């Protein structure tokens, strides 16, 4: 007789197992019994005939610690085995049971109703606000996992702003410190889990809100004679998260700070530079003391492209930087050379005030008086005393040429005489040890300002500021109180300006 192959035997075994399963399922249907998958370990227990259910004494999906509930089942007293371990009802934050979870007590029927047990959540000191999964546990074995979870409402809580960021930029955020206050309950202080925290701001034209994330405080069953219990919490929200709110403001004298979810938002908040009022919520108005913070305008800006200058040896020239102050507040700007090759030929400026929302040009002086023909590299570092501490470093390239090549507005062609009608200036002696005389020749009467600067761009002397007639004028510069070094003098007239350098040697 031919024996069946290995594959044939495997198919027959699989078919037999399938037929056995179908037969078992048909038997359970005929006897009207729960299938093994639905038993969940109930066989032989006190509620063997049906799975237990949760029945609250009050209506609603969420209940407080003061709402009792019943566990009901359809077992029979004869099914109870007095020698068996008792079945306990456990509550867990997770979908799996641990022996350290909250034990609510033994599931043992009352004299009135042997198939039900009443539980008072407040009596279980380990039970707190939030969502809990229920487990029936016998010994160390889970007998049943309840499909319905317990939803325990938060206890009463009020929020109070303690402090917040005093100033921030548009791309920054608010750091808020707040306190949660909980009134005393029957047995201490009820817990609060994932309480939403909203930050409300206004500039008087719009009301905006952003969520700073929930806060939690666990239940404390110790009364200690206190009326309130407070806990400190930290919250943070980015300015870009604020949304405008339609037809509602908590910034009044009477109302409370309602949850943001109760109001309609209508797009991003239109933030501008200025002072904002701030509240936290949801909370009662009594706790919502107001805070204030300032939002700064975007950082100041300056062109950072490489500056390229060509000068004939022995001469002085100028170039300018375009400075833009985006704030409504005045700022001070400084530009100082960062030496690569002992770049004393590059002279900046110090503490140049730029008014709010203004753009100006900062003058850089370049001197080739002591330089040989060739290329010189340096950097100018611009710093601003704005909120961001703006700092920009700009490369500078100086090409010194041997021929007298200058633009027509500063000098004539190489070897030619000075153009008529132009300002002439110089100083003697140069170098000097203690004092020197600055001499200027005006082609016409004008308002004139003569200022001396050091190599950092700091003004050290004002030699004249006022009206002068056409002709030659001399001004003495005393430098007894100044250190040795190179100094720049600048002559501003109604027609323009000219610059010279002098060297103090002590």
Image (tube, rainbow, N blue to C red):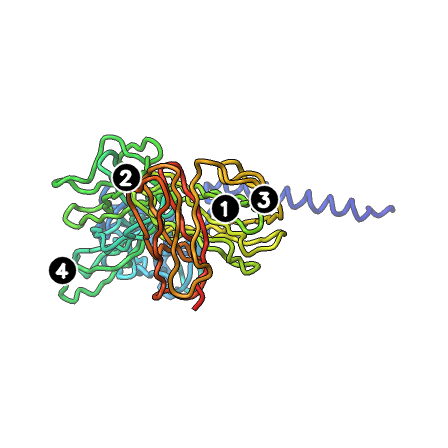
Under tag 1, what secondary structure? Answer: strand
Sequence order check: which comes first, mark 2 or mark 4? 4
| Residue 91 rendering spot, x and y as whole percentages | 35, 56
Residue 198 visible here: no
* Quadrant hosting residue 224: bottom left
Which of disc 3 and disc 4 is earlier in sequence? 4
Spatial CA distance of label 4 from label 3 is 89 Å
In the rendered image, residue 124, in percent from the top left (x then y), is placed at: 26, 60
Secondary element at tag 4: loop
The foreground one among 505 and 150 is 505
Reading the image, the residue beneath label 3 is 404
Give the mark nearer the N terminus: 1 vs 3.
Answer: 1
Given contact means CB atoms under 8 Å apart, are the residues at marks 2 and 4 in contact? no
Q: What residue is at 57 percent from the left and 49 percent from the top?
A: 398
Q: Nearer the viewer, mark 2 or mark 1?
A: 1
In three-dimensional space, the C-alpha distance between marks 4 and 1, rounded to whole angstroms, equals 77 Å
Q: Position of residue 103 (x, y in %)?
A: 33, 61
Question: Which is more toward the observer, 497 or 210?
Answer: 497
Q: Which mark is residue 260?
A: 2
Residue carrying label 4 = 227
Residue occupying the point 52% across, 59% down: 339
Identify the residue position indicated by label 1 in the image.
317
Q: CA distance from mark 1 to mark 3?
A: 12 Å
Q: Nearer the viewer, residue 236 or 219?
A: 236
**Which secondary structure lies at badge 3?**
loop
Foreground mark, 4 or 1? 1
**How far apart in space, not on screen, are marks 3 and 2 (Cα)?**
72 Å
Image quadrant containing the C terminus: bottom left
Q: Residue pushed farthest bottom?
A: 506
């Amino acid at each position: 007789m031919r024996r069946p192959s290995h594959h044939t035997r495997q198919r027959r075994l699989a078919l037999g197992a399938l037929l056995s399963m179908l037969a078992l399922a048909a038997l359970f249907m005929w006897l009207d019994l729960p299938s093994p998958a639905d038993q969940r370990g109930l066989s032989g227990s006190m509620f063997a005939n049906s799975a237990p259910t949760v029945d609250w004494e009050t209506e609603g999906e969420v209940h407080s610690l003061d709402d009792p509930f019943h566990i009901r089942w359809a077992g029979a007293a004869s099914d109870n085995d007095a020698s068996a371990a008792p079945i306990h009802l456990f509550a867990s934050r997770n979908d799996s049971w641990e022996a350290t979870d909250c034990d609510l007590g033994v599931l043992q029927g009352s004299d009135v109703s042997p198939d039900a047990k009443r539980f008072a959540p407040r009596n279980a000191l380990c039970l707190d606000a939030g969502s809990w999964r229920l487990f029936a546990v016998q010994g160390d074995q889970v007998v049943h996992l309840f499909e319905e979870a317990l939803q325990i409402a938060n206890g009463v809580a009020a929020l109070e702003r303690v402090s917040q960021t005093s100033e921030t930029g548009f791309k920054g955020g608010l750091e808020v410190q707040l306190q949660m206050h909980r009134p005393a309950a029957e047995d201490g202080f009820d817990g609060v889990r994932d309480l939403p925290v909203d930050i409300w701001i206004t500039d008087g034209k719009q009301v905006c809100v952003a969520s700073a994330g929930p806060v939690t405080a666990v239940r404390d069953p110790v009364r200690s004679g206190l009326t309130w219990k407070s806990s400190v919490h930290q919250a943070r929200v980015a300015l870009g998260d604020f949304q405008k709110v339609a037809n509602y403001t908590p910034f009044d004298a009477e109302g409370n700070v309602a949850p943001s979810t109760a109001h309609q938002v209508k797009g991003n908040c239109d933030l501008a530079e200025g002072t904002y009022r701030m509240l936290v919520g949801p909370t009662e108005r009594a706790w919502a003391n107001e805070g204030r913070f300032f939002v700064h305008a975007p950082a100041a800006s300056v062109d950072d492209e490489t500056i390229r200058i060509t000068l004939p040896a022995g001469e002085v020239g100028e170039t300018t930087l375009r400075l833009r102050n985006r704030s409504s507040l005045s700022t001070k700007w400084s530009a100082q050379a960062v030496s690569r090759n002992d770049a004393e030929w590059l002279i900046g400026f110090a503490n140049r005030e730029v008014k709010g929302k203004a753009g100006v040009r900062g003058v850089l002086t370049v001197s080739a008086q002591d330089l040989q023909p060739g290329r010189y590299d340096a950097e100018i570092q611009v710093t601003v005393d704005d909120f961001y501490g703006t700092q920009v470093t700009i490369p500078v390239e100086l090409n010194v040429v041997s021929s007298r090549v200058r633009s027509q507005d500063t000098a004539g062609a190489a070897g030619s005489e000075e153009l008529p009608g132009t300002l002439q200036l110089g100083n003697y002696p140069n170098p000097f040890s203690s004092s020197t005389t600055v001499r200027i020749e005006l082609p016409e009467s004008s308002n004139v300002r003569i200022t001396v600067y050091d190599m950092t761009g700091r003004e050290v002397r004002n030699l004249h500021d006022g009206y002068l007639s056409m002709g030659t004028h001399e001004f003495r510069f005393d430098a007894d109180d100044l250190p040795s070094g190179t100094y720049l003098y600048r002559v501003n007239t109604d027609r323009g300006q000219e610059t010279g350098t002098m060297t103090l040697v002590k």
